[in-house]
Amino acid sequence: MMGKPIATTRTVMGVSTGKLAVWWLIVSEIVIFGGLLASYVMHRIGHPEWAASAAHTDVRIGGLNTMVLLTSSLMAVLAHAAAGRGDGPLAAKRLAVTIGFAVMFLCVKAYEWTTEISHGYTITASGFWQFYYVAAGIHAAHIIAGAIIMGFVMMQARRNHELGRVELIGLYWHFVDLVWIFLFPLLYIAK
Amino acid sequence: MATAAPHAHDHGHDDAHPEESWVIKYLWSTDHKIIGLQYLFTGMAMAIIGGYFAYAFRMQLAFPGESVPTYGVVSPAQYNAMVTNHGTIMIFWVAMPVLIAAFGNFLIPLMLGCDDMVFPRINRLSYQIFLLSALVLIASFFVPGGGFGGAWTSYPPLSSEAGYSLTPLGSTIWLLAVALEFVAFLLGGINFITTTMNSRAPGMKYTDIPMVVWMIVLASIIFMASVGPLIAGAIMLLFDQNLGTHFFDPTAGGDPLLWQHLFWFFGHPEVYVVLLPAMGIVAEIITTFARKKLFGYKTVLYTAIATGILSFFVWAHHQFVAGIDPRMANLFTATTVLISIPIAEMCFVYIGTLYGGSIRFTTPMLWALAFIFEFLIGGVTGIFLGASGSDIYFHDTYFVLAHFHYTFFPIAIIGTFAALTYWFPKMFGRHLNESLGKIHFWGTVIPFNMIFIPLFILGVGGQHRRIYSYEHFPELFQPWQQDLRVMATVSLLVMLVFQALFLMNFFYSIFKGKKASKNPYNANTLEWLADSPPAHGNFLHLAEMPVVHRGPYEFNHPDRDEDYWPQWLPPEGVSAAPPADPEPAADPEPADESADQDADQDSDQDSDEESAS
């Protein structure tokens, strides 16, 4: 394995290359979710009858998951703070808690979807439900990917390696959290 | 890649990088130049497939129902599949990988004075996903039902309902291949943008960046900002095809227009994604062979940015007859006509650069000039289609087809040949044969016009697109119309024959061409400081990494005897030894100082290696 190229260590913009790359990744993700949510909002306005389907979503479960994700983001911030002080093991512990919240989010989601599907609200049930499952599904895929990457960062942080990456995965995690902050009112609260 | 093997590795010093096996070096490489060549050769192979499809369906149009040599009788389903995949391949697997990925990978680190991309392993992953996407696409031709035939725009319900498309597997696999290809370019694009933002050589200001690098980076940003909605749309279409959702099915509350919006929100910026790199390539070549500074560097830069922004507000001009609100059509007519202003500005700047220059008609210069000439025809005919009044008449005729071939052919083929002939000495360390190159140039450009001028005439005459055989349309099967079709097809055959000449010249020159010096054209940009071909690490074997002292196009400077002034040469009177501190006047950005230190401290590499292991 060769070392890092000189190019990777340069910081003409005064920001690390890793952070720049994560920001550009987030830009590309914003457009993916932006296109999806814009399509949904336009259709929702054009189809007032979708409100009848939306009435069957469970705001309490959605609200619970919102709290779970917000708490996980708080833990990601605390991990970043620990990494900033050079305390890798503590950062790793806090990342582990973050991953725990991610798993909890997915479990709640699994329970929620199972209940809904067993009541007949499948992806083909109506125009609303197809957007509901696609938007929340793509978001859940981002949670899974983020949690896996966070696991790798955690293993490195535990040995005080690459502590800068704690901030990078935190940036991504806040973004995934933020997407949910848009999804929750659009899919659950708007009746 | 196999053919490039003996020479791409023809460098003596390899201290920093131990000997690697052939597979590691050429198939598993993290070297940006090898990855660039991988993209180039994959793109060329795909171009041969796309060209063969064009040959087969053009033969069917000229001689309907007759057996096509080497192919056989073209069935209607095969015709549709070949037309669809010709478009898909030429845009996603030829124009994008060659113009952006191949030249972007090869040129960006060299022109910025870096030893590699900032994320070499992500770069490798990008190519591997791209290769996989190409294989998946090829696989889609051979599944039961045959390849997808619903046009490269893939409009539902034709693309979403297997009952209409008759290609249940072909459509899904086609969609997967396109989605994989997008992932590959997103990864590559992040690398290009980050490298250019953060890893420029010390002293290189924004206005010292070679125009082609700017253009590839802007193209990557436009791609990244426009492709997202289509990725979401592709997931919806995939679910419509396979899970029974009805996103695009009007009989169940869906909307087929949604797909058109999502597709063209990407599809139109995509034109500029491939146009801008070609414009950048032309800027490099014209300045070098006119021996003149680029006339209006900032003008080109700002017009390119303006083009990029405007390109997000023109997409509905593809949908004037799709049932959108006519008031919206007026709006999109205005933005569409508006976008021709920055593009025309760029062409004027290039023509202005030629004025008063000492022009050398080398092969790359011929290609660059042909690009401007032919692209202008494509741009001017676009006005008729951008204006909703005339588009209603021209929509879905061969006029549209001829128009976009007059834009995409100059971009993807002429632009690529310009770049390939210009940077060939740097890529392979040898020269192409100049006489064969000029024969190939005329043998490509003249038949190109002979193919598509008849198609303009047929289109104005009302010939509709996507028709397998005109025999059953008596008003479209007049002898004069058929003669024009035969003329276009014969011209295509002539053009394809001349491409064989190019391939011979290309592969012969890789092995046996005249050896190239480091800077055969006396050009200014940093890639000409490196060896031909550059070793792994580009500049690492030099005494120091390059430092930039001036802009990229300082030709015929009044204070200098030679007619060129490379970016890397220190100002007159300053010793060539590494300066203790970088030129304070050269760059006001404080961040450069630390970058300079990084560049000088090669020994830092060792400690990095330890921490990485």
Image (tube, coloured by chain):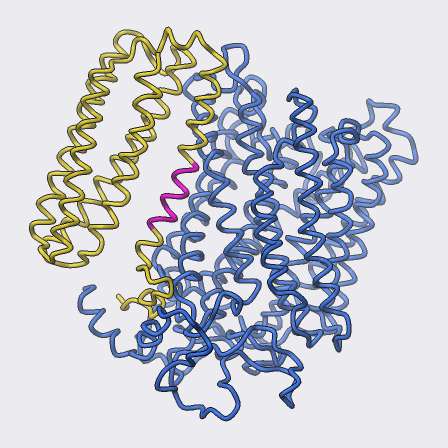
- The number of discs equals 0
Q: Quadrant of the C terminus of chain B?
A: bottom left
Residue appearing at x 78%, y 29% in the figure: B389
Residue B587 versus residue B251: which sits nearer the camera?
B587
Does any portion of residue B165 appear in the rendered image?
no
What's the magenta bit mostly, secondary-structure-wise?
helix
- Is residue B140 one of those drawn in magenta? no
- Name chain A's colour: yellow
Residue appearing at x 89%, y 39% in the figure: B483
Quarter location, residue A141: top left
| Residues drawn in magenta | A22-31
Residue appearing at x 31%, y 77% in the figure: B597
Asked if B383 appears above or below A128 in the picture, the reply is below
Q: Position of residue A148 (x, y in %)?
A: 22, 41
Residue B381 versus residue A85: which sits nearer the camera?
A85
Asked if B604 appears above or below B66 in the picture, the reply is below
